[in-house]
Image (cartoon, rainbow, N blue to C red):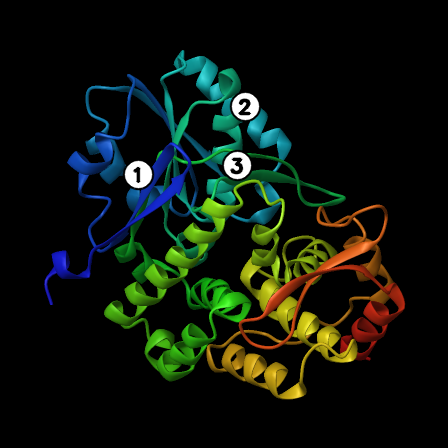
């Protein structure tokens, strides 16, 4: 199969603004394509200490003739901090970046979120290009313009909506991705189907084995289907006033789990996987869905090697307290994304905390 036959290009349209998500092998080396998206003479590449040694040299070839520099983070969610945004902004200042400069995010979701927020802050907003190198970033965080950083009190409490100028998803980079991070990305693929596409969910059940072994054609199809779904949601609700909140299925639980583990116990996708199962169990408890739907979800997650239980040592009351800080909550009450079965997610306001605590208590080991 030729490389050109595997290429997918998907447009994200937001009123009179649009950008293209380019998915397929060899995309980082198509410098003529992505270089054309840079408008000025300055560029700052933000990456991390794991990804930069693998791919920064290839990006440098495409930046020949520009004034550019790089800013590297240590690897991991704990480094998506406001302090590192400050350091990245200092790097832009040292570069002398003007309003037509571009920030290039080369890495996973942590890098993309921090780079996008940095771009949103510099001179009240400059261009940035997403070059995701993890599956999770390709199917989720690189598309849609959500940027942000963490605080000790909770995840992504600081942020802005700032759309990229382009997304360059080179699927060759997934060959160097550790198995655990690859599986974490599959959680976001499954989440998209669980929210609003039961046909896609069935397709994932049929192709779970091929996805688990990273079959290239199957993987590109899965990424493209998830991006098409998310692009449609973002186009209809860019700033998460309604429908876009559905994309957070499992996230309120998942973010609490990540925070309780100091961002080291669970990867984001792993937190989402466990969080989706907890949201499905809560939906059952509230009479919204059936146990059979929860079982299908849990089975698919486990077939792709994802966790579905709360890690040892976490306390139900602590997790509930962290869930109270979620950005979706309104007027001091829990507002969760639950479902009525596969492909039928919905926003539920005023959720009884006693019911949530009961689900957490049942799910916590010991």
Horizontal arrangement in the rendering, residue 332 relative to residue 259 (left or right): right
- Residue at image point 52% right, 42% down: 238
- Residue at image point 74% right, 73% down: 282
Q: Give the farthest residue toward the left.
A: 2
Q: Is residue 137 visible?
A: no
Q: Classify the position of the N terminus by image quarter.
A: bottom left
Q: Are marks 1 and 2 in contact (CB under 8 Å)?
A: no
Between disc 1 and disc 2, the foreground one is 2
Spatial separation of the CA atoms under disc 3 and disc 1: 17 Å
Place residue 283 in its image quadrant. Answer: bottom right
Crowdedness of circle 1 by 10 Å Cα count: few (<14), some, many (20+)? some
Q: Classify the position of the C terminus by image quarter.
A: bottom right
Name the residue tied to disc 2. 121
| Position of residue 179 measured from the top left corner of the image (x, y, whole percent) | 42, 68
Horizontal arrangement in the rendering, residue 186 relative to residue 61 (left or right): right
Crowdedness of circle 2 by 10 Å Cα count: few (<14), some, many (20+)? some
- Residue at image point 45% right, 67% down: 186
Name the residue tied to disc 3. 114
Spatial separation of the CA atoms under disc 1 and disc 2: 24 Å
| Position of residue 273 measured from the top left corner of the image (x, y, whole percent) | 58, 69
Spatial separation of the CA atoms under disc 2 and disc 3: 11 Å
Name the residue tied to disc 1. 56
Give whichever of discs 2 and 3 has the lower sequence position: 3
């Amino acid at each position: 199969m030729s490389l050109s036959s595997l290429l997918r290009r998907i447009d994200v349209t937001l009123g009179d603004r649009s950008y293209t998500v380019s998915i397929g092998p060899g995309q980082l080396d198509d410098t003529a394509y992505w270089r054309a998206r840079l408008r000025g003479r300055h560029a700052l590449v933000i990456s991390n200490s794991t990804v930069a040694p693998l791919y920064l040299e290839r990006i440098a070839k495409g930046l020949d003739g520009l004034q550019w520099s790089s800013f590297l983070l240590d690897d991991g969610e704990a480094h998506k901090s406001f302090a590192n945004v400050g350091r990245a902004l200092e790097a832009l200042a040292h570069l002398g970046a003007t309003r037509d400069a571009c920030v290039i995010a080369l890495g996973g979701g942590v890098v993309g979120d921090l780079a996008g927020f940095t771009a949103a802050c510099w001179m009240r907003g400059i261009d940035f290009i997403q070059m995701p190198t993890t599956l999770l970033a390709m199917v989720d965080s690189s598309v849609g313009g959500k940027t942000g950083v963490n605080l000790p009190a909770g995840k992504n409490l600081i942020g802005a909506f700032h759309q990229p100028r382009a997304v360059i998803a080179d699927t060759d980079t997934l060959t160097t991705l550790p198995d655990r991070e690859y599986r974490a990305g599959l959680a976001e693929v499954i989440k998209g189907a669980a929210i609003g596409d039961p046909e896609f969910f069935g397709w994932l059940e049929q192709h779970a084995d091929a996805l688990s072994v990273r079959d290239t054609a199957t993987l590109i199809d899965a990424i493209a289907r998830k991006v098409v779904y998310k692009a449609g949601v973002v186009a209809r609700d860019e700033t998460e006033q309604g429908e876009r909140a559905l994309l957070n299925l499992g996230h309120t639980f998942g973010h609490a789990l990540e925070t309780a583990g100091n961002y080291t116990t669970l990867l984001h996708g792993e937190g989402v996987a466990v969080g989706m199962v907890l949201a499905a169990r809560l939906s059952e408890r509230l009479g919204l869905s059936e146990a059979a739907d929860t079982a299908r979800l849990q089975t698919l997650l486990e077939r792709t090697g994802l966790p579905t239980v709360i890690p040892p040592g976490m306390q139900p009351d602590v997790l509930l307290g962290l869930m109270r800080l979620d950005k979706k909550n309104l007027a001091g009450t829990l507002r969760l994304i639950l479902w009525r079965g596969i492909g039928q997610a919905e926003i539920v306001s005023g959720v009884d905390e006693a019911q949530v605590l009961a689900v957490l208590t049942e799910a916590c080991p010991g």
